[in-house]
Amino acid sequence: MTLENIYYIGQTIAVVAILGSLAGIYFQQRQANKIARSDMSQRVSSSFSDSMRELMSNPGLALAFRKVMFERSELDPVESTQILTYFNLTLTAHADAYLAYNEGLIGRPLLTTFDGNTAWYLTAPAFEREWRRVRRFALYPPNFCDHVDAQFAKLFPDHAAAPQAVEAPSS
């Protein structure tokens, strides 16, 4: 065996080692991406459950929610502030979930949970009016607003108070 043959064998072994290293890095990166997706899903899911927990642990907020969703009765100014703030926090969590889904960071089932919850909330006139207001002032990205409207129309096609897309205020 000549030095040249030994050199070629060494080069071949080096190429195999490099390819093996690249394959290892590839699989590590895939695993890291799965872990990151799982972590993002957990955080997004936590924002949903935290809002439910807040609703159930705060008697005043729970009462205002009951008035809005089930009794359709008038709210006093404090109740109105509480429940509309709650609604906007849930919209913000939903918008975060929508953006994470579009970036491939969470799966469709988790986004569907937010879609159904927001659509159900929009069946209440107080929440529907607030939705029109936040759309008018462009507080959320237009593609998210269109998504919410589409999900509402899909889940509640016969609802009398269906929110309509509104124009953003002109500057």
Image (cartoon, rainbow, N blue to C red):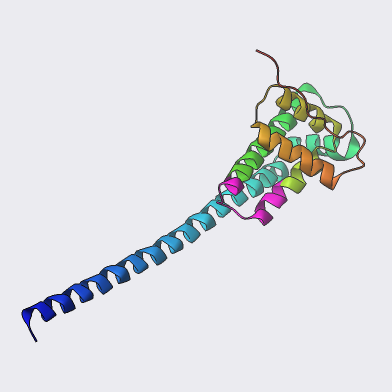
- Where residue 147 sits, quadrant-wise, is top right
Residue 77 in the image: state x and y as whole percent: 77, 22
As drawn, the residue found furthest toward the left would be 3
Between residue 10 and residue 61, name the one nearer to us: 10
Residue 119 seen in render: no
Between residue 1 and residue 36, name the one nearer to us: 1
- Where residue 30 sits, quadrant-wise, is bottom left
Q: How many numbered tags mark residues here?
A: 0
Q: Quadrant of the C terminus?
A: top right
Residue 91 in the image: state x and y as whole percent: 68, 37
134 left or right, relative to 164: left
The residue stretch that appears in magenta: 100-114
Between residue 133 and residue 25, name the one nearer to us: 25
Using the image, determine if residue 85 lies above or below residue 110.
Answer: above
Using the image, determine if residue 95 lies above or below residue 31.
Answer: above
Residue 118 in the image: state x and y as whole percent: 75, 42
Magenta span dominant secondary structure? helix
Residue 110 is covered by the magenta coloring: yes
Residue 169 seen in render: yes
155 left or right, relative to 15: right
